[in-house]
Amino acid sequence: MTEAIHPGHVAVNLHHQYATYRGRQLEKREAAAALRKRAKAEPLKVDAFQLRKQAKPLSEEAANAGAAAGKALQQFLQKAQEAQQALTARMPPEWQAWDVTKTRAYTNALQIPTVQLTRVHPKPEVVANAIQHLLGHSTWRDRTLQILIAASPTAKTLPLH
């Protein structure tokens, strides 16, 4: 019998893929730009041509990584929407034993993906961290509770503790 994987776990994994592709894109783009900058400073056209020739595949790799990042982001947003719906449909079974502080932290954490996913440009890192916090609610420490109680649904960052 196979266990169904929670869409939140899939969303977190897709965010990791997105971040990896995005980092690779930025790295390749920066390397290509550095080669082109060196080419401008070269006194001989032959040397400049060789540097530009080396920069072209890096630019293509950056474009491919950017396209892969875009696809991963779209899949992440879709799975994050599914995770948000699954998490807001019902509180965890053990919530009745929680105190007011943990209940408030959990409901604040639920608001973060809800608000972020309705925005035109949601912040993927904030959504992924909120989902990760919600999925790991059983291991929250006092510091995590303080962070989640104080977190705004429109926050630009959400630390992962």
Image: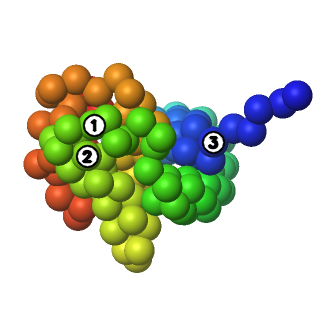
Q: Position of residue 139 (x, y in %)?
A: 35, 23
Distance between the alpha carbons at the discs numbered 1 and 3: 23 Å
Q: Residue furthest front?
A: 96
| Badge 2 element | helix
Q: Position of residue 29 (x, y in %)?
A: 48, 44
Distance between the alpha carbons at the discs numbered 2 and 3: 21 Å
Residue at left offset 36%, top offset 41% = 95
Q: Does residue 151 show up?
A: yes
- Whether 152 is drawn above or below 121: the answer is above
| Badge 3 element | loop
**On residue 103, which mark appears?**
2
Distance between the alpha carbons at the discs numbered 2 and 1: 6 Å
Q: If the image is split into quadrants, where does the C terminus sit?
A: top left
Q: If the image is split into quadrants, where does the N terminus sit?
A: top right
Residue at left offset 25%, top offset 46% = 103
**On residue 98, which mark appears?**
1
- Whether residues under marks 2 and 1 lie with C-beta atoms below 8 angstroms apart, the answer is yes
